[in-house]
Amino acid sequence: MADTLNAVRTELSIANRILANEGIFDAFGHTSARHPTNPNRYLLSRSRAPQLVEPGDILEFDLDSNPIDKNHSPLYSERVIHGEIYKARPDVMAVCHHHAPAFMPLVVCGIDFVPVFHLGAIGGIKPPFWDQRKEFGDCNYLVVTPEEGASLAARLALHNMVLMNRHGVTVVGASLQACVFRAIYSAKNAEYQVAAANAGSLDPLSPGDAKISGDIATSTTGLNRAWEVWLRHLSDAGGMPPGGSASRASSSKSSAKSASKSKPKFRAAKKRRRG
C-alpha cells in the first residue's frame, strides 16, 4: 500500500506541474486525487504554486477536508471544493479547480460552454454555472466553507465540469489523468469557442456528436498519447518533480498497462513553453 500511495503522490505532483506547464494553472489552482485504498480520504498538496509541487508536499485529508497529519503546513483555503465533491460523487477519483485564461470570458459574461471540436466534447454540453454571490451574498470568491463547497458540488451534480461565475472552473474525472485531459481540452475548446464567436456565427457539435466524441475521448489510446506528450513538454522545460522521471504511476488501468510496457526516453531538446 505504501508503494501505491507514493506512486499516487508522485503522479499528483506531476499532474500539478503539467497543468501549470500547459497554461491551465499559474500561481493558483489545485488538483487532487482520491486516496487509492481509502475512499473516505483524498490527497492534495499543501498550499504551494502548482508548478513547484513535489511528492513530499502531498498531504492526506478526510472528506471534511481536515488534514490527517496535523503538521501545521499551510493549506489551500479552497480544499472544501475537493472534499465536498468526493462526498457527493463516489465515482469521482480526481478534482481540478482552475482559472484558465481561455475560460474567463465565459465565466465573466455567463456564456454557455459548447463543444466546437471533437476533443472539446470532454467538457460536456452546456455544463452548469454556479453563482457564489447569488447564493451567499457579496464575497471574495474563495470557496472556503463546507456549505459553499457542498453548494458547488450540488450544482456540479452528475456533470463533469461546473463553471463558476466571475471565478473559474472545477472539473472532475474517473482518474487523475482523465481529469487533467478534461481540464486541458475543455480550455482549448473555450479558447476556440470565443475566437470562433468573434470571427462569425458558431457551428458547434450537435448533442449527438458531443456525446459520441466525449464518450471515446479518454477510452482510447488518445489519453496515453496526450499524457506522454505532456510529460515530454514538462521534461523539456526542466519541470519534472524529484523522482518524477522514474515514475509513470497511472490512475487508470489502460494507462497503467501502457506504462508497464514502455517509458518515454527524454533527451535534450530545445526548450518548449506555451504562453
Image: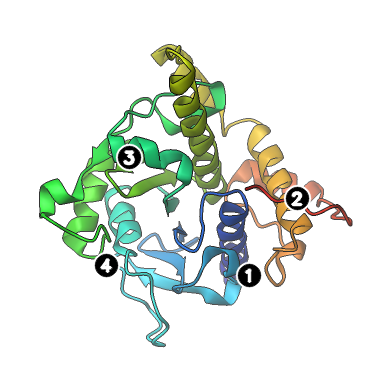
For the residue labelled by badge 2, is the local secondary structure a helix, a strand or a loop? Answer: loop
- Estimate the spatial distance between the alpha carbons at disc 3 and disc 4, rounded to whole Å: 28 Å
- Estimate the spatial distance between the alpha carbons at disc 4 and disc 1, rounded to whole Å: 26 Å
For the residue labelled by badge 1, is the local secondary structure a helix, a strand or a loop? Answer: helix
- The residue that disc 4 covers is 64
- Estimate the spatial distance between the alpha carbons at disc 3 and disc 2, rounded to whole Å: 29 Å
Q: Count residues near mark 3 (Cα–Cα under 10 Å), then give few for <14, some for 14-19, many for 20+.
A: many
Earlier residue among tags 1 and 2 = 1
Q: Is residue 61 left or right of residue 177?
A: left
Q: x, y percentage for residue 251?
A: 57, 51
Residue at position x 54%, y 47% from top?
180
In depth, the one of 107 and 256 nearer the eye is 107
Residue at position x 46%, y 47% from top?
100
Depth check, mark 4 against mark 1: the one in front is 4
Question: On residue 3, which mark appears?
Answer: 1
Q: Is residue 209 above or below residue 194?
A: above
- The residue that disc 2 covers is 272
Is disc 3 in contact with disc 1, using a CB cutoff of under 8 Å?
no
The amino acid pointed to by label 3 is Val
Question: On residue 107, which mark appears?
Answer: 3
Depth check, mark 2 against mark 4: the one in front is 2
Residue at position x 81%, y 50% from top?
264
Q: x, y percentage for residue 240?
A: 70, 64
